[in-house]
Image (spheres, rainbow, N blue to C red):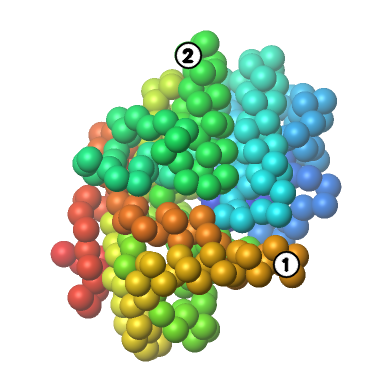
Amino acid sequence: MFSLVTGANGFIGSHLTRFLIERGERVRVLVRQQSDVRSIAGLPVEFAYADLRDPASLPTALKGVQRVYHVAGDYRLWAENPKEIYESNVTGTCNLLASSRHAGIERFIFTSSVGTLLSARPQRMPDEQTQLHLADMVGHYKRSKYLAEQEAMGAARNGQPVVIVNPTAPLGPGDWKPTPTGRILLDFLNGQLPAYVDTGLNFVPVEDVAKGHWLAAERGQVGARYILGGRNLTLKGMLELVSDLSGRPMPRVRLPLAVSFMAALADSLASRVLRRKPRIPLDGVRMARHKMFVDSPKARRELGVSAWAPGISSGSRNPLVQ
């Protein structure tokens, strides 16, 4: 098997690249000329230098490839120019879908986000059957991933062999940027997290997310979505687990969301005046207003992913054991 991985130098992409290589597959990675590729340095991969926003640069990267894993994405909760997020996540996906169709790609795995399944006021635990609208999306990142996912679904309806995966919050080694979730844990471990908010996420080992992509290529139904998730945990529960493992004391203050929102709003206004990146992304606080818990029965049933059973853990001592 010969696969192309976009975003191979990113957190999920680098783990997926390693997983495919360990399976004995040939891998070509699509990166920009200026990309930092330290996360995949030394791996036996072919490099294709291209830009997803430039359709003319893609056919060469796809030559001879059977599978495409489109993992690349602009994962930012704030951008000085939000148009950049849509150009990367929506326009880039459309360009790659079109080029893959012309190249006769046998399987196209699109990495979406669990955020496309999360509404502000869910009536039940979201799963792969949840249907939302653009108006339900909070922030440019989630809106861009929703629009890109709609393009992928449209391509599948038109006969293109597209399967969609929706990872939750991956954790593990190699989160070098880091992701927003990884930043929380790094700040905690570095003693820079004096308080936390009452929110929750579905956390999953990044290695499981990588394997889930391959399982989706092997077993996934065309046009279907699969949540690649793990355990629903409150943020307090996750921090307690990391505290137990690291010996770092838990933050003593639980910050009310209203206070967090006002702080983020003030920081956002200051960042505009000072022309700097906000320290407290306003969209991140808006998302944190509701616990982002999900279930993934379709992925467990059809892909055979070995995720933890669904549930919610507050994290009294070890929140991964119930």
Q: Which residue is mark 1?
A: 273
Q: Name the residue: 26% across, 53% down.
A: 308
Which of pointers 1 and 2 lies earlier in the amino acid sequence?
Answer: 2
| 304 lies above or below 159 | below
Q: Nearer the viewer, mark 1 or mark 2?
A: 1
Image location (x, y in percent) of residue 63: 74, 24
Mark 1 vs mark 2, CA separation in Å: 46 Å
- Please tell me in which quadrant of the rendered image residue 40 appears: bottom right
Q: Which residue is mark 2?
A: 157
Q: Secondary structure at mark 1?
A: helix
Q: Amino acid at mark 1?
A: Val
Q: Amino acid at mark 2?
A: Arg
- Please tell me in which quadrant of the rendered image residue 99 appears: top right
Image location (x, y in percent) of residue 316: 20, 75
Is label 1 in contact with label 2 (beta carbons under 8 Å)?
A: no
Q: Name the residue: 77% across, 38% down.
A: 51
| In the image: residue 318, left or right of residue 17 | left
| In the image: residue 142, left or right of residue 258 | right
Q: Name the residue: 21% across, 51% down.
A: 309
| 33 lies above or below 105 | below
| Residue sitting nearer the eye, 83 or 226 | 83
- Please tell me in which quadrant of the rendered image residue 98 appears: top right
Which quadrant would the N terminus be assigned to in this image? top right
